[in-house]
Amino acid sequence: MFDKFIGVIPLVPLLPLIGAAINGFVSFRGWRPARSFVHAVACGSIGISFLITLGAFFHFVGLPPEAREMTLTLWPWIYLGAVHADVAFLIDPLSLTMMLVISGVGSVIHIYATGYMAHDKDYPRFFAYLNLFCFAMLLLVMGSNLFMMFIGWEGVGLCSYLLIGFWYEHKPNAAAGMKAFVVNRIGDWGFLIGVLLLFWTLFQLGHPTVTFTEIREQAPLLVGHAWGGVAVVTLVCLFLFVGATGKSAQIPLYVWLPDAMAGPTPVSALIHAATMVTAGVYMIARLNFLFSLSPVAQTVITTVGFSTALFAATIGFAQNDIKKVLAYSTVSQLGFMFGAMGVMAYTAGIFHLVTHAFFKACLFLGSGSVIHGMSGEQDMRKMGGLKKYMPKTFLTFILATLAIAGIFPFAGFFSKDEILWKTFSAGYYFQWILGVVAALGTAIYMFRLIGMTFLGNLHEETGGEKPHHPHESPASMTIPLMILAGLSIVGGFLGFPESLGRLFGLHHSNLIEGWLSPLFHHGVEEGGELGVPIAEYLLMFFSLAVAVGGSYIGYLFYTTRRDIPEKIVARIRPLYQVVVNKYYVDEIYDAIFVKNLLRLNQGMNLFDQKVIDGLVNASGLVVRIFSWISGFLDKYLVDGLVNLVAEATLASGRNLRKIQTGRIQNYLYVAVGGLVVAILYKFL
Amino acid sequence: MPTINHYLMVTALVFCLGLYNVVTRKSAVGLLIGVELILNAAAVNFVAFAHFNGNDVAGSIFAIFIIVLAAAEAVVALAIVVAIFQQYHDIDTTKATLLKG
């Protein structure tokens, strides 16, 4: 009964595009329509997309696992030499999962934004960008070939830039947008190099293609193909991973994401937490058949992933801006996903992507609700005790926090534990330790956030400033929070571990594993043996203990025993300063790259002014001399000849015009005379 | 019984009179009369040749065409003459020189 949804799947990205076009036109013309029109268009388009996706999802669930893959070709696109790319959508469990997350969480956030952005004068422009983002993101995950994916990849980057700098009148916002764009360009460069290298190698092997399904068939050909002593597949994977580090904010290109919090909070939730930043994870999952071929790339990815997880978590301790904490938390959680990708636990990574989309969107929207209630205040030191003013926000926030901290039975426990277990069982012990410490850190800084924001007393540290009047947000904001909090609770049961399921007599309890695994048949084999997996239980208990312990420490330190963190900070003052300043990474980048780039630019400018301009001026002088000579010749020689011809023509014209009297009789005289002459000549 | 030569001599005379008229007259109406004489001489020639060539219909048809053509020409030409008269209060063609370069 759901098969009719398959035919209309092209509408899924198209509707947000139409919505963006309508609101963009309205905004461009400077019209100020009723707000209800704007958000009916925006929320309606993405909502219908979600319903269609849901229908297609139910259709696919009804199909046997091996039939859950189809390509919808709309029209041929690039047929140039060996390149054959169609405008086509690849619909399979992976893209459907992503589509559900994008359109589902996207719809909820659109609804939230109608409340959050209610007083903004650029209301239509905001929703136009938001819809355009949904279009680009859906294109990214639905595209059946690398070019379609690349267009989506660039499109989401553009929308991210537009939305970070949405309040562009304030200069730091515009600068943050620019930073995000430039850093993403570096990643995009890597991604493009990876794509082209892959295509070029496949071309040399006689099977040029950019379509995912065809690359999957040809991937084994790449084995043993080396380029400059390095396996080509490793190079391709590493270049693609550079793209992923840019888009998904991993070391060393994570620096843009915390600054991206300059955008409106719904944007932070949708783009910089739930969807766009997971594009890198999705890309690796989509090309898992390539990454599975390269152990070197896997080690790099998992190491970078878990290092980022720990690194960002430590920065999260020392931030005082509520959104910055969540931003570093996002970087950290993305690190977990990449860690999973690196150990070929693709399902676990996508699972964490989904649960993270739920609880992190909820946290961001909750922080937006707090900021809204505090009239734009983002500094946690000026908050506290909001529990009694904003009960709904507090309740949803605490649920999402329990989920991200990894407390059983909330969503984050299952997904994070799955990743750590897969990492451990794959033998990456060092990376596992990084991950466990990062998980501990996550619990601590999240409860620090709760303690500073919702618990304690308001204005504890305002120091005599004018007190705020916090208030609960409208229903358009709290209902999305409740939806996402609900998903944060139940989302984890999608991936209920097999080993736990067996205790309850369930088989195939890991639904998401069963749903996605046909795609990742190269992945780590699920432990099918029936023995009681003691090690898995132990690790599960261990990570739960870590999460609970971290939560307790965070709660304790930042509510009742605030003296303890102060003492610790006093003990390690220099190290604390380093952490507060985010390890000076921005400053280091500034000193190494930005300053030197500017210096290089200045050098280029000097070179341009002195050398290039000198050459240009010299050649200009030569041209002037030659033109003077040629002008002289032209004036006196050529013009003389031309004038002579002209004078001669004029003179002959002046004389010949006398013949033309304009009197027909004269002409007839001549004609008759000529006739007479002709007759005389004939007969005489 | 007149032969074709009689006809040809008459039409040659009429043609020459018409030509003379066209060449010498200054009056626009006089010119127009000269042109009519020339056309009618030609028409008579056509009919004569047709008659002496086995009574061919084509010649008569030509003559009719010429009459129609002459009528149309007279209409247009007289309209121009009227217009010239309104402009110059004269129909002397040598005086209508406003468009001369």
Image (cartoon, rainbow, N blue to C red):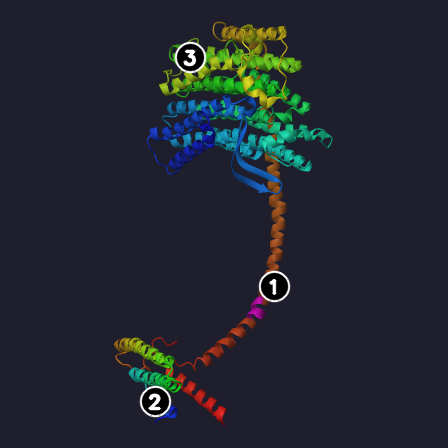
Query: Dot 3: what SS?
Result: helix
Chain part drawn in magenta? A634-639
Which residue is nearer to you in this view: A452 or A503? A503
Residue at position x 47%, y 15% in the image: A488
Give amino acid for label 2: Val
Choose top left, top right, bottom left or bottom right for residue A473.
top left
Identify the subunit bearing mark 2. Answer: B
* Horizontal and vertical percent position of residue A671: 43, 85
| Front residue (pair A81, A56) | A56
Q: Secondary structure at mark 2?
A: helix
- Which one is in front, A682 or A290? A682
Q: Give how far apart the Cα atoms at labels 2 and 1 are.
A: 73 Å
Residue hosting label 1: A629
State the predominant SS element of the stretch in magenta: helix
* Disc 3 residue type (three-letter): Phe
Residue pointed to by mark 3: A394
Q: Secondary structure at mark 1?
A: helix
